[in-house]
Amino acid sequence: MQDAVSPAPTLVQVRQVGFAAPLAWLARGWKDLWRQPAASLFYGVATAVAGAVILGITASLPYLFAAAITGFLLVAPMLAAGLYELSRRYLAGEPAVLVDSMFAWRRNPSGLVGFALLSILAGTAWQVASVVIVALFYKGPAMAPMAMMVEVIVNPQHYLLFFVYVCAGGFLAALVFALSVVSMPMLVDRRCDLLTALSTSINAVAENPLPLALWAFILMLLTGLGFATALVGLVLFLPWLGHASFHAYRDLVE
């Protein structure tokens, strides 16, 4: 039988939190991670394997390799739905097993499918934008993706490309963060429509710019470390951040 879902009003109030709140979210997420480590780490392993496949496919495509990394980050909130469901069950005192968490989408199918489509659209848009930016601004010789990335970073000739790429990617990442930081766990926790979840997420960011800027930095730092360790670090970092993100939502939303 499908679990009951907490109703959500059309207008959802958000709370203000302290600047150090992200550290508390990390602490609670860490505790959830080790309640059932096999279930949580399953999502980390699955994500790392999926990331390796994506990067492997684009390894010989200089125009898509860097975009694949960024696009992977854009859809990461969608991949953590099962982790949100585990944390929700822990807080509610409900039985929490891996199989149940894998069907988290059944709690709010229309909202979660809508968010998934939005995430795919954002990732696809970035792939296209990345190809266009590189085609317009890269003037060097064709080379392997990693060598090309290093060339763009260290060679002053490509500083305009680097600046445009970082600004465009940063803008899209900030927009996706503002839209998703609360909305995805909210869609798992409550029966609400996608627009309500997205607007609540934006309101939460508007009410807490500094704490959520710190939270965004922590997300980027740990995700970057995950990639720097050839995706091995993501096995631990993704479930940790997924659980912590659910606690962020619970603190930020009435």
Image (spheres, helix red, strand yellow):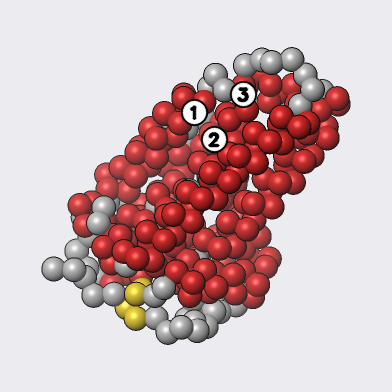
For disc 2, the marked residue is 68
Work out how far the residue at label 3 is from the one at label 2, CA to CA, in angstroms. Answer: 10 Å
Left or right for 142, reference 48: right
Judged by depth in the image, the label closer to the viewer, 3 or 1, is 3
Label whose residue precedes the other's in the sequence (1 or 2): 1
Give yes or no for contact between labels 1 and 2 (Cβ–Cβ under 8 Å). Answer: yes
Instruction: Residue 165: give x, y in percent of width and height.
Output: 72, 39
Instruction: Residue 50: give x, y in percent of width and height.
Output: 39, 35
Instruction: Residue 134: give x, y in percent of width and height.
Output: 71, 31
* Quadrant in which residue 97 is drawn: bottom left
Could you tell me which residue is drawn at 83 percent across and 32 percent down?
Answer: 159
- Identify residue type, mark 1: Leu
For disc 3, the marked residue is 62
* Quadrant in which residue 133 is drawn: top right
Instruction: Residue 164: give x, y in percent of width and height.
Output: 77, 41
Label whose residue precedes the other's in the sequence (3 or 2): 3
Could you tell me which residue is drawn at 55 percent across and 50 percent down?
Answer: 122
* Quadrant in which residue 42 is drawn: top left
Q: Is residue 215 visible?
A: no
Q: Is residue 169 above or below residue 215?
A: above
